[in-house]
């Protein structure tokens, strides 16, 4: 699917992910009035926003709790906007929305926060989103009585999400650290069936929790070169978007560099995970223990390609490994 209708976020246009037409979309964004009302470009009121005091400041963006009221009622949600006035988060909002819409086709939309509105206040772009009640995956693993099983099941769920988003919209997250993944303590029965190389793949997973993927601020869409880029200040438009295995490589590395995580794992599994950091005949396991940022240097290489961590390959490996910790 290349065309996404944006009416649900207040924009009376379609987004074609095969080309970048975000300039036109920006010109048609709803506007926030001085009283907190968000209205369409023809003046139709969408909702009323009341900003609360709680603020979460990230690397590039700010999250703030708000009350959002429309004809369906009043809810608490988050609004996100950039720390810098010249940093445009429109593409981030669009990528998050179409990722949610894509997972909804598979009844897995609970793994991404829904985007409600994308709008402008003066020259600054904001977007509102569902508030997810979850905890850090690191915290969940460290508090678990079965950390190995939880760790593997988190990775399996993430593989399933990434397989769908790659297959449907050619998405690469590009910033998959453990801080950008939550655990929600709600049971999930996950089922994905797809075909690859004339082979039928059927994955099922039942767990007492599910993951939620956060922060699309570095994400891109594009089968080869980037078409829609959420971070034009960091990544060049001409850069290859889909780098095989990048996302799963980064999430594992972001956990492995933390001593508390390594100490929590069974020594046998820890030794196995160390072998995952052999890349192009070089063993990176030592640097993986000592640094949490080194992966960005390695994955920035145009030729980066880790077939082991490609979600379609890695998930099969994980299913076999999972049998040891049932």
Image: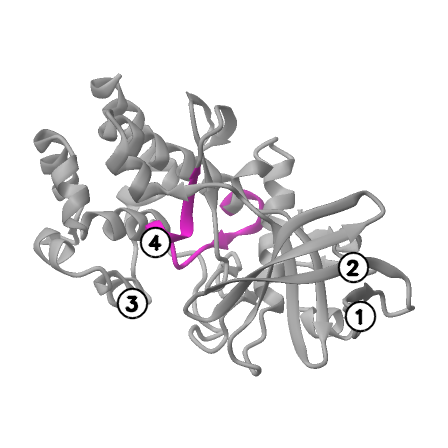
Q: Secondary structure at mark 1?
A: loop
Judge the density around disc 4: few (<14), some (14-19), many (≥20) Cα neighbours within 10 Å: many
- Looking at the image, tell me whether mark 1 or mark 4 is earlier in sequence order: 1
Residue under pointer 3:
301
Residue under pointer 2:
48
- Residue 71 visible in the displayed image: yes
Along the line of sight, the residue nearer the viewer: 175 or 77: 77
Q: Secondary structure at mark 4?
A: loop
Q: Nearer the viewer, mark 3 or mark 2?
A: 2
Q: Which residues are magenta?
A: 166-183
Whole-angstrom CA distance, mark 4 to mark 3, is 18 Å
List x then y, in percent, for residue 230. Answer: 53, 67
Whole-angstrom CA distance, mark 2 to mark 4, is 34 Å
Judge the density around disc 1: few (<14), some (14-19), many (≥20) Cα neighbours within 10 Å: few
Is residue 107 positioned above or below 18 on the image? above
Residue 308: image quadrant is top left
Would you say residue 248 sits in the magenta stretch?
no
Judge the density around disc 3: few (<14), some (14-19), many (≥20) Cα neighbours within 10 Å: few
Q: Secondary structure at mark 3?
A: loop
Q: Secondary structure at mark 2?
A: strand
Q: Residue at x 39, y 37 (%)?
A: 312
Whole-angstrom CA distance, mark 1 to mark 3, is 48 Å
């Amino acid at each position: 699917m290349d065309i996404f209708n944006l009416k649900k976020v207040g924009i009376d246009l379609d987004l074609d992910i095969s080309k970048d037409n975000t300039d036109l979309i920006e010109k048609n964004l709803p506007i926030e009035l001085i009283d907190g009302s968000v209205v369409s470009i023809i003046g139709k009121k969408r909702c009323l926003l009341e900003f609360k005091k709680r603020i979460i400041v990230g690397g590039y963006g700010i999250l703030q709790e708000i009350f959002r009221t429309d004809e369906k009622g009043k809810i608490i949600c988050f609004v996100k906007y950039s720390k810098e006035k010249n940093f445009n988060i429109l593409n981030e909002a669009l990528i998050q929305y179409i990722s949610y819409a894509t997972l909804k086709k598979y009844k897995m939309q609970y793994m991404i926060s829904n985007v409600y509105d994308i709008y402008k206040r003066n020259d600054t772009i904001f977007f509102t989103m569902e508030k997810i009640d979850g905890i850090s995956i690191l915290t969940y693993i460290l508090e678990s009585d079965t950390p190995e099983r939880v760790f593997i099941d988190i990775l399996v769920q993430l593989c399933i999400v990434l397989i769908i988003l790659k297959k449907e919209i050619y998405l690469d997250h590009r910033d998959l650290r453990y801080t950008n993944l939550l655990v929600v303590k709600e049971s999930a029965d996950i089922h994905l069936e797809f075909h690859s190389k004339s082979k039928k793949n059927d994955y099922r997973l039942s767990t007492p929790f599910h993951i939620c993927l956060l922060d699309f601020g570095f994400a891109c869409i594009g089968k080869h070169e980037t078409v829609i880029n959420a971070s034009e200040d960091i990544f060049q438009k001409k850069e290859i978007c889909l780098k095989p295995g990048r996302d799963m490589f980064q999430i594992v590395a972001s956990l492995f560099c933390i001593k508390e995580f390594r100490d929590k794992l069974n020594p046998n599994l820890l030794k196995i995970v160390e072998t995952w950091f052999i890349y192009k005949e070089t063993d990176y396991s030592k640097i993986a223990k000592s640094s949490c940022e080194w992966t960005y240097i390695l994955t920035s290489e145009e030729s980066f390609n880790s077939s082991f961590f490609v979600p379609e390959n890695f998930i099969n490996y994980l299913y076999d490994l999972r049998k040891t910790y049932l």
